Image (cartoon, rainbow, N blue to C red):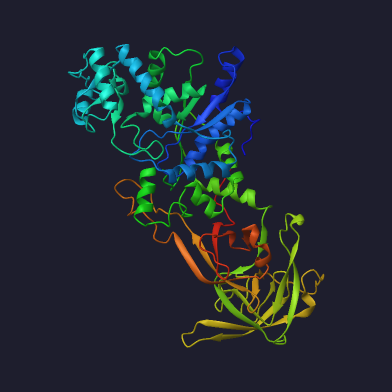
Amino acid sequence: MCNEEKVLNFIDRIIGEELEEGIVKEVHTRFPPEPNGYLHIGSVYAINVSHSLAKKHKGKFNLRFDDTNPAKEDVEYERSIIEDMDWLGVDYGKEPYYGSDYSESIFNYAKYLINKGKAYVCDLSPEEIREYKGSLTTKGKDSPFRNRSIEENLDLFNRMKDGEFKEGERVLRAKIDMESPNISLRDPVIYRILHLSHYRTGDKWCIYPMYDFAHPIQDYIEGITHSLCSDEFKNHRPLYEWVLKELDLKGSIPRQIEFGRMNLSGVVTSKRYLKQLVFNGYVDGWDDPRLPTLKGLRRRGYTKESIFSFLNEIGVSKIENTFNVSILENSLRQDLKDKVKGIMAIINPLKVVITNLDEDHLEYLDAENNTGNKSLGSRKMPFTRELYIEREDFSDNPPKGYKRLVLGGEVRLKHGYFIKCNEVIKDNHGEVVELRCTYDPETKSGSGFTARKVKGTIHWVSKDKSIPCKVKLYEDLFLEEPSEENLFESINKKSLKVIENAFIEPAVKELINEERFQFIRHGYFILDNKDSKVDSLVFNRIVSLKSSYNK
């Protein structure tokens, strides 16, 4: 999880001062997702801000579903969010909260505003409301229904609740200031009619509060002290404060504080964009490893520790920032390097025959699982007459400085022996299909042999004892920054490469429950539990071994 002892950010300083001055007695924050999509890396950023501050100051943290729009919400998304929150290890109490549970209270608070002369039922169409609001350069003008009597407004609002009107026929608006320079204060809609079944409350309600009205009330009901949100809600803060003030609430009143959004280069976190990619079949569902959804990151092989390490490294700013995705990848490498066991896998095999070994030769060589962490032990690698090496580890026309296998040259097999290439077999097209080599039995790894040296060490697997598998290699999903106009056109068609005929050493059978591995020289990989079968293993590359990241 996060480092709770660290001074996190400017919000931490504000909260610390409020606690010292007695403005607040405890810290209570929340994360209020709408169940209309899947959590992504940007969601975890927001979660970490609120949760870390609550835990540091020994306060409370709520998970509350903002489920007041039945047009977009679904139990599928609710369950997914709970599952992701539990995987992150975020402590949100025994159960999540639901905005829909406060429907009666919010309805009564709306009637309180009507009785106070601070809300009215408006018959303007959505288009007319937008027109009457004006623009950044022009003032708004009053609705012709703004001065209805309190009695008429109460009657109409109750009839809205009883389902007498069609969608869009009437709305309830706050009565604030149609000439305000802040457009969000120009008599905003606070209730609308929706004749839709809600995934939790069914058909009990046909009117639903708008987010800007419901949210401050929900925060107040739950005792939230600090409503932390991204800076896109900065212009909405005056409305948040207006609602709380005009309701004449008693006791502790929540305070909204904004922080800058976090973006990753080459990654989209917009729910609208993500839904288009998923529903149009451009990716393999919400858990596609190329997506920044938490489901995708988990299937890709990211650990929660690496995600929180990344978030704590970049900190929290008052302004929106975009970070290079390589920083996130580097956090993952640092987390995995001493945790996972190494194993050899060949993804582009070239056959090697050791001609001075008997056909039935079988020898088991000792191999360390992780050279940086001895506690991860060792494994046995079968060494046989026929092997596979990577095709790129042999060249019959080697470039300058090439240190791997060549005709007449010698290399070390990792954890094994020196081998020398004596003959190259090619097919009718001139492609190399087999190497015939000899090995030197005196050069076994760990034997202390020093009579001569070789410049290169290559990885390998036994041809007969290895296990066939499929490997998926991932690159960036987009070739350029996507937008509404070029979302599909900017997709990198080479973002997924599937290797059908890879081979992995048989120790994977004993280690399979560990899921993550370092494939020597290829990077870190995870077993794809979604696509793998007992007799057909599939591995996703989590991240390569090398990074372009500079701290």
On the question of residue 8 being in view, the answer is no
Q: Say whether residue 323 is left or right of residue 330.
A: left
Residue 9 against residue 288 in the figure, above or below: above
Residue 1 against residue 513 in the figure, above or below: above
Residue 483 position, x and y percent, is: 33, 46
For image coordinates 43% across by 43% down, the residue present is 75
Q: Quadrant of the N terminus?
A: top right
Quadrant hosting residue 520? bottom right
Name the one closer to the observer, 255 or 122: 122
Residue 227 position, x and y percent, is: 48, 25
For image coordinates 66% across by 64% down, the residue present is 343
Q: Say whether residue 471 is left or right of residue 1.
A: left
Q: Quadrant of the C terminus?
A: top right
For image coordinates 66% across by 56% down, the residue present is 340
Residue 217 against residue 349 in the figure, above or below: above
Quadrant hosting residue 183? top left
On the question of residue 448 being in view, the answer is yes
Name the one closer to the observer, 408 or 45: 45
Residue 234 position, x and y percent, is: 40, 25
